[in-house]
Image (cartoon, rainbow, N blue to C red):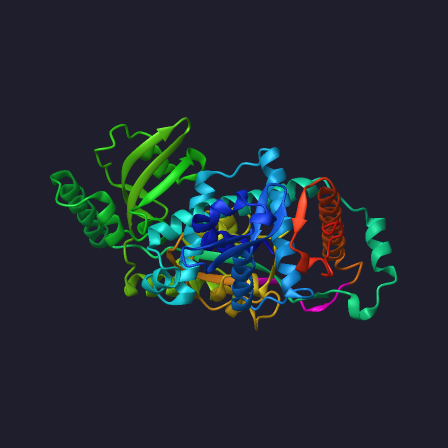
Amino acid sequence: MNRYLMTLAALLSAVLGYAATLQPSDSIASDSLGTIVDEVIWVVGDEAILKSDVEAMRIQGQQDGMHWNGDPDCAIPEQIAVQKLFLNQAIIDSIEVTEADISQGVEQYLENMISVIGSREKLEEYHKKNISQIRADLRESYRERQMVQGMQQKLVKDLTVTPAEVRRYFKDLSQDSIPFVPTEVDVQIITQQPRIEQEEINRIKEELRDYTNRINKGDATFQTLARLYSEDPGTARRGGELDYTGRGTLDPAFANVAFGLTDPKKVSKIVESEFGFHIIQLIDKRGDKIKVRHILRKPVVSDDAIEKSLSRLDTVATALRQGQIPEMLKAFVPAEKRAEKFTFEDAVSVFSDDKDTRNNNGLMFNTTQEGQRTSRFKLADLPPEVAKMVDTMQAGEVSQPFQMINERGKTVCAIVKLKNRTEGHKATITEDFQVMKNVVLAKRREQVLHDWVVNRIKSTYVRINDRYRNCNFEYEGWVR
């Protein structure tokens, strides 16, 4: 339910923030013509819930295909009230959210909304605000949303379940209730970065030098050029601005240059990172964090370079299927390996450019919703190009070479080996213990949070409008 609060607060907090100080007896506000503007329908602690809050969440739920448990007129204000309980405790417990996380989350949300609604202009028309005002409204609501999640995580972080508890839970479960485990695969990958022509690199650098000259001459501001030309979608709309960020979260080459800047009026030298080429301008420093703006340009990989990489990987794939090293590849393979069977692991160590998988024999890793790191992927969790390849492959098979965009936004060429495939099936305690353990743990977490809310209601001032007193609420104690 948390995901709806961000939209809710974004729409309402800026214009209705005054309502938190109202009491139910003051609940109806009118404009100069006597028309009802809004109404306070619940008070939880010192926080008010407005009728417009409920309507905003209802609309958002309809857009997202949300189905409420029970009567939406009762379920929606109750869920808003529950979030206010978690938020109040998060403030008491000093749950913190970094400015960098807020900026990243808000920009991602805006990009998703623009994608859904069609354009920035349509989004501004829908909200009746410009993009800067929408962004400003979103920041505080996103902060609150993250604080609520942080509080919930704190309450359940030490929960564990034993194997005996897992077995007991599933012992008498009906077949219809046993979870279905989708098809899962383990995949090894070799990726190669097609060679970028020096002429293309020179072109990118010359453009960045031109930007620097224009800024230094006063012909344009850094922010304007970033909006026009930067290829970092997360910051371009903000004039290239990265919020306060620690060194450890930045590309090392970028961080070395950014943290070396001292004059906000100057533009850095050109710096190459794993994402492309940048120029950087200092905004502010605060302790061990820095606030900068940057312009990113990415060299274009030529079709010829892509074809060469695909051809080379095709030769590697053929050699792997035959288990022999062709003459054209022997120069790249250590002498002690040339007489042995040529394995995928050997090929990874020699040919793969992907630092994240090269030291792990090419095995791809996935972080689950529970925060666990595993080599097992559901097809939907793989990069689309990889999923398309392995969908029809058999275990042990090596794919044809293909082209894809990696997580850093770069064009790469790749081959994959399907290391293992487990077809979709009903979970069993012997084969899918971790899946079943996660189910039991999720149930336990849900119960802990439910009990916390019930206990919190008992010690919190609550007043609700009379028309809600006959609601069948999920949590007991609202009506007194």
Q: Residue at x 68, y 64 (%)?
A: 69
Magenta extent? 418-427
Residue 211 horizontal/vertical position (percent): 18, 46
- For the residue pair 121 and 88, the one nearer the viewer reads as 88
Q: Can see residue 202? A: yes
Residue 342 seen by the camera: no
Asked whether 420 falls inside the magenta stretch, the response is yes
Give the quadrant of residue 430.
bottom right
Left or right: 308 as drawn, with respect to 96 = left
Image coordinates of residue 338 in percent, x first then y, are: 49, 53
Magenta stretch contains residue 87:
no
In the image, what residue occupies the spot 30% across and 59% down?
Answer: 301
Q: From what the image shows, is residue 452 above or below residue 352?
A: above
Residue pictured at 47% horizontal, 44% vertical: 140
Residue 177 appears in which quarter of the rendering? bottom right
- At 84% from the left and 64% from the top, the residue drawn is 173
Task: Please state if 410 lies on the left or on the right of 208 as rendered.
Answer: right
